[in-house]
C-alpha cells in the first residue's frame, strides 16, 4: 500500500515570500459630455510644471542644472533589477479576483560570484546528452530521488544553500554516468539561495513468511519530487527578515529526470503588498498544483483528511453503482 504525503506548512520562520507580476487593472475611458450651452467653452487646465503666459515670475533652469544625457541612460536600482529579472525568468499567476498592487520594499542581498576552474556551463546543451567526463561531486548539491540523482553546482558558502543552475547533471541512482537534465522552464543565470524540501510516498511491504522474527512491516520512503524554494531577496537563514519566496519554486521530477519552475497561484487580495509572514503554501494533485493562501484559511489536518476521503469515497461508490444501472451519473448524493 502507498500513503501519499502532502506538504502544506510554511517554514518555521516569519514568512513573507516574493516578487510576482501584478495583474493589470481594468481601464475605463470617459468621454466629455456635450455642453448644454454652446456659448460656454471649456477652459484648458494648465500643467503645474508649465508657467502661465501671464505670470511674470517664470522659473527657468540654468544649463548646468539639467542632465543632458539620454533619458534611457540611467542605472536601475536593486528593486527594478529584481523585478525585471523575475519578469524575464517567469511570470507569476495571480488570482483574477484578487486585487494586485505594485511596489516592493527592501533590496536583494548580493551573493559574491566565485570563479571555479572546473565549472562547465551546461546551458544550451542537448538534454540527456551523456557527458564524457566525471565531475567532483563535492562541488555539487546532490539530490537523491527514487529514479535518479540530481547534481546542481554548489558555490562555496558557509550556509551551504547557494545553487547555480547553470551547471546541472543527472545520473541513475549511485552511478557516475552523468547526463544533461531536461530544463522545461527558464532558470536564473545567477546564484540564488534555496531551501530544499521533497514530495514522496511511503512504500509499506509485509515481511516474507520465512522470517517470522522480522519486523511486522517494512516502510521505505520514495522521493518523487524535490522542491527548491528561493529565499526572498536571497536573505540568509539567520536574517531577522528571512522569509521564503513561495512564488519562486523549482521542481525536480524523478520520473522525467527534469527540472522546471512551478506555476504558483496567489489568491491573497493584497498581492505584492501583502504581509508575507502570513502566507501559506498549499500543494495538491500529487505535487503538481501550487497555491498561496492566507494563514487564516488553513484547515486542520482532520478536516483535510475527511474532505479528501469523502471525495474518494464518492468516486468509489459511483464506480460501483455504475455497474448496476444503465446510465452514467447517479443523483444519490
Image (cartoon, rainbow, N blue to C red):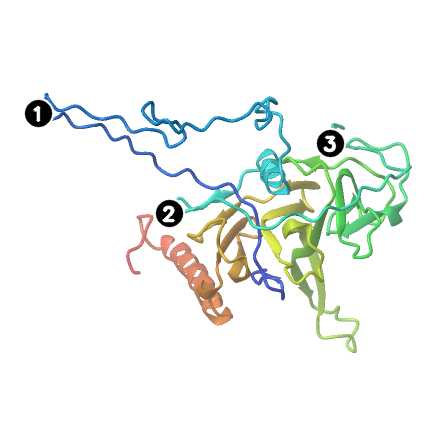
> Up-down: is 66 above or below 298?
above
Mark 3: give few (<14), some (14-19) or many (20+) Cα within 10 Å: some
Is residue 148 at all visible to an observer of this figure? no
Q: Position of residue 86 (x, y in %)?
A: 60, 39
> Up-down: is 121 above or below 263?
above
Q: Which residue is mark 1?
A: 37
Who's the residue at 49% across and 51% down the image?
A: 273
Who's the residue at 68% across and 46% down the image?
A: 252
Q: Earlier in the sequence, mark 2 or mark 3?
A: 2
In the image, 37: left or right of 79? left
| The label number, if any, that marks residue 127 in the structure image | 3
Who's the residue at 82% across and 52% down the image?
A: 157
| Residue situated in front as seen by the camera: 241 or 282 | 241
| Gap between marks 2 and 1 measured at Cα | 43 Å
Is residue 62 at all visible to an observer of this figure? yes
Q: Nearer the viewer, mark 1 or mark 3?
A: 1
Q: Position of residue 67 (x, y in %)?
A: 59, 26
Q: Where is residue 136, by image quadrant?
A: top right
Q: Earlier in the sequence, mark 2 or mark 1?
A: 1
| Gap between marks 2 and 3 measured at Cα | 39 Å
In the image, 22: left or right of 43? right
| Gap between marks 1 and 3 measured at Cα | 73 Å
Q: Position of residue 84 (x, y in %)?
A: 59, 35
Q: Quadrant of the C terminus?
A: bottom left
Amino acid at each position: 500500500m502507498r500513503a501519499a504525503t502532502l506538504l502544506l506548512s510554511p517554514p518555521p520562520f516569519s514568512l513573507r515570500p516574493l516578487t510576482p507580476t501584478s495583474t493589470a487593472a481594468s481601464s475605463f475611458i470617459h468621454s466629455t459630455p456635450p455642453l448644454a450651452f454652446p456659448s460656454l467653452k471649456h477652459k484648458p487646465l494648465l500643467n503645474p510644471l508649465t508657467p502661465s503666459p501671464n505670470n511674470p515670475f517664470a522659473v527657468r533652469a540654468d544649463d548646468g542644472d539639467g542632465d543632458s544625457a539620454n533619458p534611457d541612460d540611467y542605472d536601475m536600482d536593486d528593486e527594478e533589477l529584481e523585478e525585471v529579472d523575475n519578469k524575464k525568468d517567469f511570470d507569476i499567476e495571480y488570482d483574477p479576483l484578487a486585487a494586485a498592487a505594485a511596489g516592493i520594499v527592501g533590496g536583494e542581498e548580493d551573493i559574491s560570484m566565485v570563479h571555479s576552474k572546473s565549472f562547465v556551463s551546461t546551458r544550451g546543451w542537448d538534454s540527456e546528452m551523456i557527458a564524457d567526463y566525471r565531475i567532483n561531486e563535492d562541488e555539487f548539491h546532490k539530490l537523491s530521488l527514487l529514479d535518479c540523482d540530481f547534481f546542481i553546482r554548489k558555490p562555496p558558502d558557509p550556509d551551504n544553500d547557494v545553487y547555480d543552475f547553470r551547471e546541472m547533471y543527472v545520473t541513475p541512482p549511485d552511478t557516475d554516468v552523468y547526463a544533461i537534465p531536461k530544463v522545461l522552464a527558464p532558470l536564473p543565470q545567477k546564484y540564488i539561495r534555496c531551501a530544499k524540501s521533497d514530495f514522496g510516498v511511503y512504500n509499506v511491504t509485509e515481511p516474507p513468511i520465512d522470517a517470522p522474527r522480522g519486523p511486522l512491516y517494512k516502510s521505505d520512503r520514495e522521493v518523487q519530487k524535490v522542491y527548491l524554494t528561493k529565499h526572498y531577496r536571497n536573505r540568509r537563514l539567520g536574517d531577522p527578515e528571512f522569509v521564503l519566496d513561495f512564488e519562486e519554486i523549482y521542481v525536480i521530477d524523478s520520473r522525467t529526470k527534469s527540472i522546471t519552475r512551478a506555476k504558483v497561484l496567489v489568491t491573497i487580495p493584497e498581492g505584492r503588498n501583502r504581509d508575507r509572514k502570513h502566507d501559506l503554501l498549499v500543494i495538491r494533485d500529487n505535487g503538481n498544483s501550487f497555491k498561496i493562501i492566507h494563514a487564516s484559511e488553513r484547515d486542520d489536518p482532520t478536516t483535510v483528511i475527511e474532505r479528501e476521503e469523502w471525495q474518494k469515497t464518492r468516486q468509489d461508490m459511483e464506480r460501483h453503482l455504475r455497474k448496476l444501472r444503465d446510465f452514467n451519473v447517479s443523483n444519490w448524493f
